[in-house]
Each structure stands twice: as C-alpha cells, then as structure tokens.
Image (spheres, helix red, strand yellow):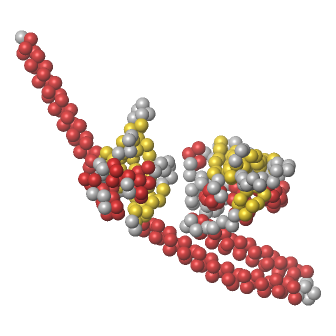
C-alpha cells in the first residue's frame, strides 16, 4: 500500500543519509589526520579572517610562542590583539615566504588564498615553518664572511700602498715591461679590493644592515656616467645602445649614487651577458608626477614565464645552455631589488622567451619645498 511504500522510501533515505554522514565523518577524520601529520603549522581562516581549523603543529607553535591555548583559537579579539600573530594572519605573501619572529623563534610564513571551483573566496591558509636553526646558521655564516672579508681587506690595502710607492719611487729606474707588470698588479689589487667590498656589502644587505648615504643627486648624471662606463663593453660585443634621457631635466632624487650605480651595473651586466652579439640594448628615463621611471630593455634570449616569479630572490639561477650558462651566485637581481627598495622605490620586469627582456624601477622624485 501507499503508506508501506512511503515508509520504505523513508527507510532508504535514512540509510542513505546515515551512509553519507558516515562517509563525511571518515573524510573529515582523514583530513584531520593528514593535517596533523604535517610537520609545519597549518592555520585555515575563513573569508572573514576567523580561524576555523589548525593542525597539531600550529597549535603547539601558538601555545609555546604566544601562550595561545587551543580553546582560545576561536577568540577573534584575543588573536588579533597580539601584534605578531595579527601580522602573520593578515600576511599576503604570494609565492615568496616571509620571515617573522615569534618570541625567540623565527618562522617562515607562506600564505595563500582558498577559492572554490567558481573562484569564490573561501578564506586563506597560512603555513608556518620553524627556521630558527637556519636563521642562526645564516647569521653565523654572514658574520664569518664579514670577518674574513675585513681581514683580507687590511693586507690588501697595504699591498696597494706598496705598489703605489713602488711606481712612484721607481718611475725613473723601471723598464717599460716592469712598469707595465706593476700597473697590472695595481689594477688587479683594485679589482680584488672591490670584490671584497662587494662581498661585505652583500652580506650586510642580506642581513638588512646595509646603510645608505642619501644625498640630493642628479639621477640623470648617474645614468650618463653609467652608460659611459659601459660603452666599451657594448662596442666589444657589437651591441647597439640607445640611450633616451631628458636633455635638461636633472632628475633630482634623494639617493646614494654609488649604490644606484651598483644596481644599474647589475642590470646592464645581465643585459650584456644575455644579449647575442649584434643585438640591442635600450636605456630610457621618464617622469610621472611623483616618480622617475628607469627602464632597460634588450633583445636577448628572454626568460621563461615559469622562472620570472623567482628572479629577484636570493641565489636563484636559471639553467642555461652554452654559451649563456654563466657562472655566478644568483644575487645580482636580489641586490637590485634590495637597493631600490632601500630608496623607497619598486622594481618590475617583463620578458618573452627568445625575444628579450625589460627591467625597470621607479624612484620617488625629490620634492623641493616651496620658499
């Protein structure tokens, strides 16, 4: 009868719901087990920035470093009332992890949005990794490099002085060949001193300790001097060089000219290295209402899309085929970005494989105070 059929249907629906609920519970348990097996801390936020899930590692980190107990994780005001935790939960790191200190520990934080199939915002997942030991090792390494570099620089300065003295006192007694060899030694000593100074500066830059000497300078003069220094390199490789700079505007900024030269040298070095003989390099500068934009474009081999996101990070090198498999530390573009950001500027790049690249940066104009 109809009542019997209806009862049977209800039984089927009940059994189906029980089965589905059991499956959902098993999936939730499996997910919880997977999360808790991850050594890194995982914090899941909803689209209102509230903590909705954590794994065991995250709960341990928060309790040990900030004294946040597991039963307090739902307390929005308590969590966001702690400045260190507020920074971490609000961080939008993109592809690059950011370091934060929690108590006496250092953590690498990676944050990414969570979206559904319709690209609707569901929240954010934050991953915490304890890098205290790595950070301490980096600090020891940097101290060692700085110490050794300073120890090397002292005797080199003496050698440089003796070479100059030899050139001065022996100018009437040395043969042309002897003078030539001593001048080569003098030039190579200068190069070695410059390399050591760069090592010290890079170490300070990595540690965030590099100090600028900002002054009122003409960026136009910096660009002109840099272009003149590289002219011989362009000619040696038969590269056409197009320099488009303002005729009369000095492009005044508050900056450290030697550091900006360093950044420009790194960009030009890459452009020359990776542009085939007979190619072209273009340098241009233009102003907006509050910034000066510098762009360096080349007709070189370009950069694959998958590598572009890592270009300005430390020690990143792209695997190249000869003759472009140039040895180096992978610090050039990291130095560029760091120096420009120290000047309160920003960097960017565009590139297409086998067609060329364009690297640019913007610096704030020096705003003259009205009389």
Q: How many marks?
A: 0
Residue at 43% over, 63% down:
101
The answer to which image quadrant residue 105 occupies is: bottom left
- Quarter of the figure that contains the N terminus: top left
In this picture, residue 306 sits left or right of residue 321:
left
Measured as percent of width and height from the top left, residue 137 is found at 47, 70
Residue at 56% over, 52% down:
310
In this picture, residue 55 sits left or right of residue 156:
left
Residue at 59% over, 54% down:
312
In this picture, residue 32 sits left or right of residue 45:
left
- Asked whether 81 or 180 is in front, the reply is 81
The reply to whether residue 306 is visible in this rendering is yes
- Asked whether 186 or 118 is in front, the reply is 118
Q: Is residue 207 above or below residue 109?
A: below
The answer to which image quadrant residue 184 occupies is: bottom right
Measured as percent of width and height from the top left, residue 259 is found at 70, 63
Measured as percent of width and height from the top left, residue 82 is found at 38, 57
- Asked whether 113 or 289 is in front, the reply is 289
- Quarter of the figure that contains the C terminus: bottom right
Measured as percent of width and height from the top left, residue 44 is found at 35, 47
Which residue in the rendered view is the most extreme toward the front? Answer: 371
């Amino acid at each position: 009868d109809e009542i019997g059929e209806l009862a049977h249907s209800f039984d089927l629906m009940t059994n189906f719901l029980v089965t589905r609920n059991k499956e959902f519970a098993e999936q939730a348990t499996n997910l919880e087990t997977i999360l808790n097996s991850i050594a890194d801390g995982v914090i899941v936020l909803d689209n209102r920035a509230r903590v909705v899930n954590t794994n065991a590692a995250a709960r341990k980190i928060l309790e040990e470093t900030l004294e946040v107990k597991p039963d307090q994780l739902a307390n929005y005001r308590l969590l966001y009332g702690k400045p260190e935790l507020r920074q971490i939960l609000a961080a939008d790191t993109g592809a690059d992890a950011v370091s934060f200190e929690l108590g006496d520990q250092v953590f690498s934080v990676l944050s990414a949005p969570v979206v559904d199939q319709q690209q609707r915002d569901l929240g954010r997942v934050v991953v915490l990794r304890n890098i205290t030991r790595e950070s301490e090792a980096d600090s020891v390494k940097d101290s060692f490099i700085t110490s050794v570099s300073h120890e090397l620089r002292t005797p080199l300065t003496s050698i440089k002085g003796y070479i100059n003295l030899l050139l001065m006192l022996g100018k009437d007694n040395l043969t042309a060949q002897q003078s030539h060899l001593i001048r080569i030694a003098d030039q190579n000593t200068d190069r070695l001193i410059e390399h050591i100074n760069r090592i010290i500066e890079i170490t300070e830059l990595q540690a965030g300790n590099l100090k600028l000497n900002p002054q009122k300078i003409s960026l136009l003069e910096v660009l002109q001097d840099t272009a003149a220094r590289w002219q011989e390199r362009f000619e040696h490789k038969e590269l056409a060089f197009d320099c488009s700079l303002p005729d009369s505007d000095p492009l005044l900024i508050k900056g450290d000219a030697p550091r900006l030269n360093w950044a420009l040298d790194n960009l030009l070095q890459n452009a020359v290295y990776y542009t085939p003989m007979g190619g072209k390099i273009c340098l241009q500068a233009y102003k907006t209402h509050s910034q000066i934009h510098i762009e360096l474009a080349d007709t070189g081999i370009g950069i694959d899309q998958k590598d572009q996101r890592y270009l300005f990070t430390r020690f990143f090198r792209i695997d190249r085929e000869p003759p472009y498999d140039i040895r180096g530390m992978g610090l050039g573009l990291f130095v560029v970005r760091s120096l420009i950001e120290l000047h309160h500027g920003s960097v960017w790049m565009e590139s297409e494989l086998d067609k060329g690249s364009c690297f640019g940066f913007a610096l704030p104009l020096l705003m003259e105070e009205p009389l």
